[in-house]
Amino acid sequence: MGKKRENINKAKESGKVQDQNMANLFDYEIALQVQEGHEKGCPSQTNSDQETDEETFEEPPSVREDRRNIAMRMKERKFKALVEFRCRVEDAILGDYLFGKPSNKVGGEDNAKAIEQLKEITLWGVPLMPSKRHGGTDIVLLKFLEAKDYKVLEALEMLQRTLKWRKEFKADEILEENLVPGFENLTYQNSSDKDGHPVYYNVYGALKDQQTQYRILGSEEKREKFLRWRVQYMEKAIKELRFQPGGTNSIVQIIDMKHAQGPTTKELRSVCRKSWKLFQDHYPHLIHLNIIINVPLWYYISHTFSSRLKTQRKKSKIVIARPGKVTSTLLKFIPPENLPVEYGGFKRDNDDDFSPEDKVSEVTVRANSFEHIRIPAPQAGVTLVWDLTVVGSCDVSYKEEFIPDDEGSYKVLLQNEKEKKKGEGVRNAFYISEPGKIVITFDNPLLKKTKVLYRYKTKPTVPIYVLNKN
């Protein structure tokens, strides 16, 4: 603990920490753990990638030491910024200028009452008063710091603008408003990604015709209602988050542009731009990752051009997928059992056959070759159910058949598709009347390999003829 207290003393001596008594309230180790947990939520290089690089390339000890020193200096810089930000937020609360300029009235009963109210202020359900030592306060403050590259004064101004906007926009009351009619098919929440972030889908293809767009966005009043609905949905998403050390404190947003209108639809483009800016300004780093799928050519070209003007840090928050790459892109972030079947995954609404705990296997179909999946069925009197989806850059043909163990019995052809398109999920089932196996054969005639994901399970079944007899 001596080294950690030495770092706190350095922060004090730098002149950035104004109140030494307050600084003593905050423990360096806790802050560092919170910061490290926050960095794990950022879409940067994963630990597994880093380990692979270190195993592949042997670095000289001096290089590793330099890297450690740089990392420690960065952590120390971030911690100092966090300590200063805590103090400035506390000063803003006690000085009654958290919403901007301090009140003209100094002292008095009204001023004391206003300060007491500010001490209880929360953001996203988390107390902002640092001396309350709530586990989520540092996590919230770090989001504003990171958005401003750990520049404390800019982060404080951003926080003040956010609190002022929420008061004017009545964001804390928006969950009580009835804004759903007309927007039911535009957004929905569906499971989580590989790291536990809730995944939200925005289906802009629901606005594919001019009549629907006019009904939803045809006037300034309707566009304002649409914007309030987008904020309402974000507030609902925040309710699913845990602003605690080790908790999930950001979401993944998937924007599906399939059948979306082109760049001439200025109303949709305008309201999307406003909502995007609003989330950047007042919900910093609450969106862990934006994945835009089924991107039309006009959007892809526009984004590629505009992204040249952005920093690498900002670009890393956005992933673009053209129609042919949707399934393979989404599966990099979302496990197949959590990905909806319409996007090439296995998740179906009200699924009575499978659960997210059922194991998913994969097989690679090499270029210009055949590959077989053999599903054993040693027990008669059950129904075998299986899911499969093709992931890759090419289509394959496939065949499904039941092959009994008894050589005197006949094979049963279940499915013979000349072409199985990538990104299409398939479910099939077969009643097992005698021991055998299901064999699924894939034929890849092209010069690129592809991947097949599958899972299966057996279900006890009473044959229909027995039920009819009874």
Image (cartoon, grey):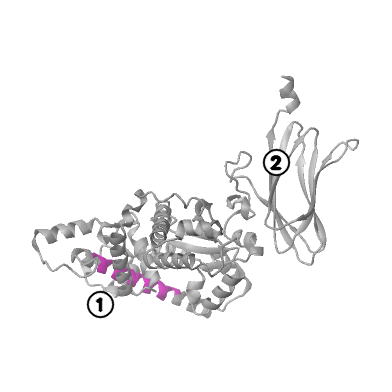
On the picture, is 410 further left or further right than 373?
A: right
Of the residues under marks 1 and 2, which one precedes in the sequence?
1
User: Where does the magenta region start and end?
Assistant: 71-90
Residue 128: x and y, percent?
29, 60
Disc marking residue 15 = 1
Q: Amino acid at mark 1?
A: Gly
Residue extending furthest toward the left: 108
Disc 2: CA contacts within 10 A as few (<14), some (14-19) or many (>=20) = some
Disc marking residue 385 = 2
The question of residue 84 being in magenta is answered with yes
Eye-nearest disc, 1 or 2: 2
Q: Secondary structure at mark 2?
A: strand
- Give the residue displayed 57% in from the left and 77% down from the top: 59
* Residue 229 sits above or below residue 104 on the image: above
For the residue pair 266 and 151, the one nearer the viewer reads as: 266
Q: Is residue 203 visible?
A: no
Q: Amino acid at mark 2?
A: Val
Of helix, strand and loop, which mostly describes the magenta segment? Answer: helix
